[in-house]
Every structure is written in C-alpha cells, then in structure tokens.
Image (spheres, rainbow, N blue to C red):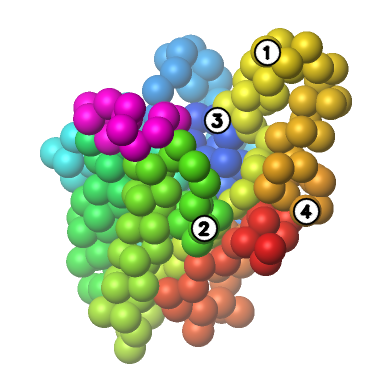
Amino acid sequence: MLKNKSAIVTGSTSGIGLGIARALAAQGANVMLNGFGDAGAIADLAASLRAEHGVAVAHSAADMARPEQIEAMVAEAAALFGAVDILVNNAGIQHTARVEDFPAERWEQIMAINLSSNFYATRAALPGMQRRGWGRIINIASVHGLVASANKAAYVAAKHGVIGLTKTVALENARGGVTCNAICPGWVLTPLVQRQIDDLAAREGLSPEAARARLLGEKQPSQEFATPEQIGALAVFLCSPGANQIRGAALNVDGGWAAQ
C-alpha cells in the first residue's frame, strides 16, 4: 500500500517506534530510523528490514532535544528518498517525581524531546507534504495525553501538548491531503516497560507474573498489554485511504484505561 512512499519514525531503534517502522516497511515504505543504540545492532536492524521488505532503510542519530539536528534529519531523509511522505513522532523519555521534587532540568528535557521535537519535525516536513498534496503526520502521544497520573507532571503535560499540536496541525491542513492524528497507547510491552516489571518484582519480592498483573491492574482494565505490532497496524491504517477523513483524532490503544 505504501510503495514509493517514505517515512521518518523517531525513536525507532526499539519498542513502539521499531514496531511502527517494521509495519510501514512491510507495506513498502522506505524508512528513516532514528534513535540511539549500538551502531552495529542498528546497522543489522536496517539491513534486516531492507532484506525482508525490499525497501530503502537509513538511520539518523539526530538528538530529538536539538532542533537543528531534527531539521537536518528531515532534510537528509528528503534527499535520500526524494520525499518525506510520512512522519511518525514517537521519541520520548520519562521521569517520575512529585512536582515539588521534580528536577527543573528533567522537566526541560522531557518537554524538548516529548513535545518540542514533534513541532520541529512537523514544521520541517510539512511544506514538502503540502507541495505534493499528500502526507501523514502521526504523533505517538499516550493515554497520559488524555488523563493524568501522579508523579508524571512533565510527561503528562507534554503528552497533552502533543494532542493539542495534533489538532492544530490537522485544522490548518483540513482542506488538503495532509492529515495529522495522534495514537495514545496505554501500557505497551516494550523493553522499557519490561524493566519496570522487573524492578517492581525485585522491589516488592513478587514473581514476574505477579509484578506484571500489579502493573496492569492499576490502570489497564483489559489486564493485557498492547503490543508494538498493534500500534504499528494502527499507524498503517492512518496512512490508508480509509483514514482520509480521520483528522485531529486522538486514538487510544489502552485496554480501556481512559474509559474508566
């Protein structure tokens, strides 16, 4: 479906971003990966995507806290692939603390990576999409863009901001072929979340199964994790003709979290 289209997926060397990159590549899209990690492992990942799907795959180590690097990444992808048709703003970080104890530098870092990077990447990619009359901007927000949790002030504020940005970009492009939407995952079983399960198990003396149930039980009524593959499938749908009139939506994939 996406043959001859090209995508950037930020924060895509693991977890949700990698799931989305795999799903887009499987539909024939060229993909610019982004993120930190072992250079050899990233090269192997890119090579496997090329071999499996017959698409062009590149990697940018652009720091999502640096606007000039974000703009350079978009320009590099446009030069390599000929266009940036799909932009998935996925990169994000987390820190937990009460507001009065929240380090100012961590607040600034989370705002830069989780919110401002979406703006800078969108600003850089939009003009080309508008000229070509087609584009898809998909912001990976969070269920925390819809509801709050204690001790996550910066993350919650940033993700609420992502949804606001999504709606504004959608409205500004409502009469053209460029759409902008947000996906709002709840708990997704990624390496990052697995570490939280392991830490909880060690801290509370729980079995891995009990720690997993505790984590889900607090928030996610389905008692099941969403998966990167499910998030990737939704991203692919948002790139399809069936989603042409889905504009400015915040689509939660959260096992019922926000329904409570």
Amino acid under label 1? Arg
Query: Could you say where residue 211 lies in the image, as x and y percent from the top left?
Result: 77, 25
Query: Could you say where residue 102 lies in the image, as x and y percent from the top left?
Result: 32, 30
Quick one: label 3 or label 2, which is nearer the N terminus? 3
Residue situated furthest front in the rendering = 100
- How far is the residue under mark 1 from the one under mark 4? 24 Å
Q: Which residue is mark 3?
A: 14
Q: Residues within 10 Å of mark 3 (few under 14, many from 20)?
A: many
Q: Residues within 10 Å of mark 1 (few under 14, many from 20)?
A: few
Q: Quadrant of residue 68?
A: top left
Query: Could you say where residue 121 lies in the image, as x and y percent from the top left?
Result: 27, 51
Callout 3–callout 4 Cβ contact below 8 Å: no
Q: Which residue is mark 4?
A: 221
Amino acid under label 4? Pro
Which of labels 3 and 2 is toward the front?
2
- How far is the residue under mark 3 from the one under mark 4? 26 Å
Disc 3 element: loop
Disc 1 element: helix
- How far is the residue under mark 3 from the one under mark 1? 26 Å
Segment tinted magenta in the rendering: 94-107
Amino acid under label 3? Ser
Q: Is residue 180 above or below residue 203?
A: below
Name the residue at 57% across, 66% down: 251
Q: Which mark is residue 147?
A: 2
Q: Quadrant of residue 73?
A: top left
Quick one: label 3 or label 4, which is nearer the N terminus? 3
Quick one: label 2 or label 1, which is nearer the N terminus? 2
Q: Is residue 103 visible?
A: yes
Residue situated furthest left in the rendering = 68
Which of labels 3 and 4 is toward the front?
4
